[in-house]
Amino acid sequence: MRPIVAIVGRPNVGKSTLFNKITGKRIAIVEDTPGVTRDRIYSDAEWLDNQFILIDTGGIEPFSEDVIISQMRAQAEVAIDTADVIIFIVDAKGGITPADLEVATMLRKTSKPIVLAVNKIDDPSKFNEVYEFYNLGIGDPIGISAAQGLAIGDLLDEVVAHFKELDLKEDDDDATKIAIIGKPNVGKSSLVNKLVGEDRVIVSDIPGTTRDAIDTPLEVNGNKYVLIDTAGMRKKSKVKEDIERYSVLRAITAIERSDVCIIMIDAEEGVTEQDTKIAGLVHEAGKGVIIAINKWDLIEKDDKTMNEFRNKIRANLSFISYAPIIFISVKTGQRVQKLIDLVNFVHDQNSMRIQTGVLNDIISDAIIMNQPPVNKGKKLKIFYTTQVSTKPPTFVFFVNYTEALHFSYERYLENQIRSRFGLEGTPIRFIWRPRNDDEEN
């Protein structure tokens, strides 16, 4: 499980610039306008062989009654709750503001490690401006320039130093960890209660009742499981907030910890943009995945309804076409108990290892049936294939010329492997490595 680092602070102090500098990508929109980053943005990051997830948040403006600012503040609070380490960034040029003091007070109430970054120290002669920020009571400030990349390494050294203090290992490594994810109010907590047979999680019609991710142990036929119910909103707010934005961040931590993810989709609403985002997170993380269509009891049906609905799901979530779909009703219990059998099956598929000899026979047959592509007169040759890891199954192809590879041929080879071994419910990864013809000879 990778640590989560959240960058927080009031608007226009350089959070997105720092985010882009650390991740090496221009993911966050950078504009000299306070509040331009309205949604949390997240990315994989690495420093000194320490891998972590970095979150860029909307600015915290404690005293504003503006609806957008209030939404951003609520999102940042969720990020603070979810993060393992927090980077609190302030603006050296502006000095300490009342908003900075309020944010500092909010952060001091957490038990999370906090690293204070004083941004916009673009000139080393201005370093004395850093000392003012000791008054925030957060700890030793680190002067940086996110725009110029100055002292970012010092900042990250301090961030990753806190990782060794974190307990990121699961207590029960023998248990299959199941993340139940989806939009707020889709029935996640109700599903947990139905599976364990008792009311272990608060269930309410108010979206986002669950505040934090809740782990519930479960044992079925001697097999141990941990059900991870992801949280919705942190709290009810005076402003009408778009709470679906918050479920993505909550899902990240659950996905990271899980072996198998159950994506719950509301049968009455169908696939939404938020469902697509969550499914994309699962696919990128390489986890086993099941799509559970809940509230199926509320749908008027005939003999074609299920197939038509399944086809819509496949069309909207084509990138996880490998995921099994099950139609359930948590309220009536319809097919709920079949979920555990499906979890066991998907977990086995995600952990599958294929013998090298058998794998190369499949690839050889596939090449005979459909010759590899040609690029600039040079034909792709596949010399050898081997599986290097599981969870998800990952295969390395040694080839002569990677430039000749086309995504359609990669998809063809994936389909050939799946047709032989199934690998239902799991993504598979291909790695292409160049190798000279002379080496093969």
Image (tube, rainbow, N blue to C red):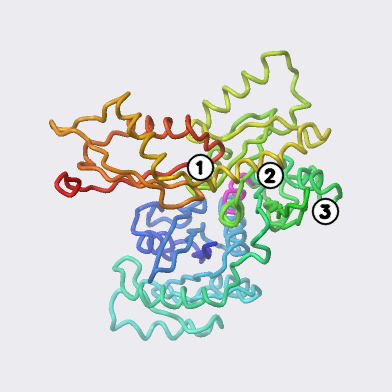
Sooner in the amino-acid sequence: mark 1 or mark 2: 2
Please tell me whether mark 2 or mark 3 is closer to you in this view: 3
340 relative to 405 in the view: left or right: right
Mark found first going from the N terminus, 3 or 1: 3
Instruction: Choose the circle earlier in sequence order: 2 or 3.
Output: 2
Q: Secondary structure at mark 1?
A: helix
Is 191 situated above or below 324?
below
Circle 3 sits on which residue?
A: 200
Neighbours of disc 2 within 10 Å: few (<14), some (14-19), many (20+)? many
- Give the magenta range: 242-249
Residue holding disc 1:
280
Q: Which residue is mark 2?
A: 184
Residue 314 place in picture, x, y as percent = 54, 27
Placement of the C terminus among the 4 image quadrants:
top left
Query: For residue 348, which quarter of the picture?
Result: top right
Magenta: main secondary structure equals helix
The answer to whether 413 is drawn above or below residue 147 in the figure is above
Q: Amino acid at mark 3?
A: Arg
Left or right of residue 65, residue 330 in this image: right
Q: Residues within 10 Å of mark 1 (few under 14, many from 20)?
A: some
**Secondary element at tag 3:** loop
Between the residue at mark 1 and the residue at mark 2, the CA separation in whole angstroms equals 17 Å
Distance of label 2 from label 3 (alpha carbons): 18 Å
> Where does residue 234 sit, x and y in percent of width and height?
68, 56
Q: How far from the left and from the top, in percent, is residue 311?
A: 57, 22
Which amino acid type is shown beneath numbered disc 2? Pro
Question: Residue at point 74% right, 28% down?
Answer: 296
Q: Is residue 320 magenta?
A: no
- Give the residue at x 66% y 53%: 176
Residue 63 vs residue 324, the one in the foreground: 324
Marks 3 and 1, Cα distance to the nearest angstrom?
Answer: 29 Å
